[in-house]
Image (cartoon, rainbow, N blue to C red):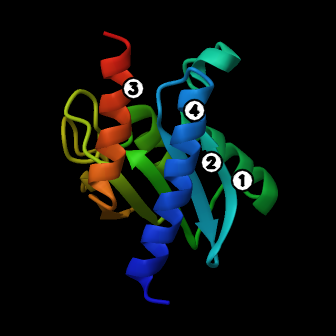
Amino acid sequence: MEIVDVDISFMQLALEEARAAVAAGEVPIGACIAHDGKILARSGNRTIRDCDPTAHAEIIVIREAARLLGNYRMPDTTLFVTLEPCSMCAGAMIQARIPRLVYGADDPKGGAVRSCFEILANSTLNHKVEVRPGVLAADCVSILQSFFAARR
């Protein structure tokens, strides 16, 4: 299977997590993290459920993957997320040394990869992240738009 096909398959899993987040009353963002071609962890946002402003989908899967790997550093992993990570989540990726990010929709109100900030591209960092934006972007945007339209 080509890397592009794998990216789409894993992004579809992240979208499943985003849909589950909607059902739980959470903002529909989903994430999963893969290592050696297999999913280690997957989750949607849990900020409301956990009463935790740091319980973004990315943080949850990074924590679980680190626990499963027995290491706070995660070489050979890819993080898949339906929305461009915020500054907190981008910072966590750097701390975890995650080498690759695949995301769906840009976040013009808080994205820290290329929309508002470019944290992962900062040349002073000692870690570089390969970024592939826009995977299944229309699906990722649609679920967010539907969620917020229903609340207006």
Q: Amino acid at mark 1?
A: Ala
Q: Position of residue 122 (x, y in %)?
A: 25, 51
Q: Earlier in the sequence, mark 4 or mark 3?
A: 4
Instruction: Name the residue carrying label 3.
Output: 147
Q: Amino acid at mark 2?
A: Ile
In primary-sequence order, the first of circles 3 and 2 is 2
**Relative to residue 10, is residue 39 drawn left or right?**
right
Rendered residue at 31%/65% (across/down) = 132
Residue 62: mark:
2
Query: Which is more foreground, mark 4 or mark 2?
Result: 4
**Lower sequence index among marks 1 and 3:** 1
**Residue on which the image places disc 1:** 66
Crowdedness of circle 2 by 10 Å Cα count: few (<14), some, many (20+)?
many
* Residue 21 in sight from this viewpoint: yes
Task: Measuring from the top left, give residue 32's x and y in whole percent.
Answer: 58, 54
- Give the distance between the C-alpha atoms of the residues marked 3 and 2, in whole angstroms: 25 Å
Task: Please give the label number shown on residue 21.
Answer: 4
Mark 4, secondary structure of its residue:
helix
For disc 1, the neighbor class at 10 Å (few under 14, some 14 to 19, many from 20) is some
Quarter-of-image position of residue 35: bottom right
Q: Sequence-wise, which precedes: disc 4 or disc 2?
A: 4
Is disc 3 surrounded by few (<14), some (14 to 19) or many (20+) residues within 10 Å?
A: some
